[in-house]
């Protein structure tokens, strides 16, 4: 994290109201991208993003290390989204099983970017389970490293890799079902 960002976090923790604006300006778009990637764009996502910022404001004084703010922020955003999904569906949609079909071919980061570029992003992401969608959004759309995605999701890095692999395969299947050329 940029030392200037850390300073803004510390200023917010000390109660400087003027520091919260730059913090939101820096992180609002990535949080919005994450939330919209998880629940789709629209009023629901906007409401959830607001909930994230309310929780940040309330919880920031308890953050011990300003350097971990990005991971802390996305962990908090993840909780807001999962709480919403649980309320909406009355059960969490967790799919931690291994890939029964084995490895798929051509599942590089470039393939995922190319695949997502050919279809409506919201519709494609909606075909994924919540855990797989979260991994794709954090890793591919927000460009976070595997270790950070693992810390946010509270799982080992190997699990994140499995989720990404499974998500890529499902996105390819979705494209095939839609008749998209490869």
Image (tube, rainbow, N blue to C red):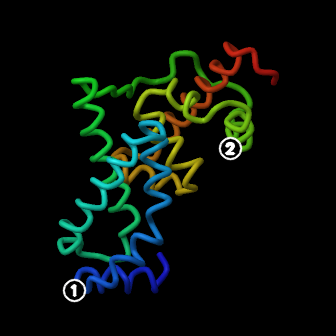
Q: Between residues 171 and 38, which one lies in front from this camera angle?
A: 38
Picture coordinates of residue 140, whole percent (x, y): 59, 47
Picture coordinates of residue 81, whole percent (x, y): 32, 42
> Dot 2 lies on which element?
helix
Write the residue at 52% across / 24% down: 127
Horizontally, residue 166 falls left or right of residue 159, namely right
Picture coordinates of residue 97, whole percent (x, y): 40, 23
Q: Which mark is residue 14?
A: 1
Q: Between residues 113 and 84, which one lies in front from this camera angle?
A: 84
Write the residue at 27% across / 28% down: 88
Mark with earlier residue (2, 1): 1
Camera-near label (2 vs 1) is 1
Categorize mark 1 by other alpha carbons within 10 Å: few (<14), some (14-19), many (20+): few
Q: CA distance from mark 2 to mark 1?
A: 40 Å
Q: How many marks?
A: 2
Q: Quadrant of the C terminus?
A: top right
Question: Taking 78 as reference, is 60 above or below it?
Answer: below
Which quadrant of the view contains residue 170?
A: top right
Categorize mark 2 by other alpha carbons within 10 Å: few (<14), some (14-19), many (20+): few
Question: Taking 2 as reference, is 91 above or below it?
Answer: above
Which quadrant of the view contains residue 177?
A: top right
The residue wearing badge 2 is 109
Q: Which mark is residue 108?
A: none
In the image, farthest residue toward the front: 43
Picture coordinates of residue 181, whole percent (x, y): 81, 21
Write the residue at 22% across / 31% down: 87
Mark 2 touching mark 1, by CB under 8 A?
no
Question: Taking 99 as reference, is 13 above or below it?
Answer: below
In the image, farthest residue toward the right: 181
> Dot 1 lies on which element?
loop
């Amino acid at each position: 994290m940029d030392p200037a960002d850390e300073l803004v976090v510390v200023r917010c923790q000390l109660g400087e109201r003027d520091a919260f604006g730059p913090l939101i300006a820096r992180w609002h778009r990535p949080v919005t991208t994450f939330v919209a990637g998880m629940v789709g764009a629209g009023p629901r996502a906007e409401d959830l993003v607001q909930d994230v910022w309310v929780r940040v404001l309330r919880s920031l004084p308890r953050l011990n290390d300003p350097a971990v703010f990005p991971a802390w922020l996305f962990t908090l955003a993840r909780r807001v989204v999962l709480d919403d999904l649980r309320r909406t569906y009355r059960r969490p949609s967790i799919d931690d099983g291994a890939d029964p079909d084995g490895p798929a071919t051509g599942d590089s980061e470039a393939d995922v970017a190319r695949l997502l570029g050919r279809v409506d992003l919201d519709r494609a992401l909606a075909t994924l389970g919540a855990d797989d969608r979260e991994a794709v959004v954090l890793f591919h759309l927000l460009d976070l490293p595997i270790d950070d995605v693992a810390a946010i999701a509270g799982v080992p890095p190997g699990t994140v890799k499995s989720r990404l692999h499974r998500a890529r395969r499902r996105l390819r299947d979705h494209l095939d079902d839609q008749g998209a050329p490869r």
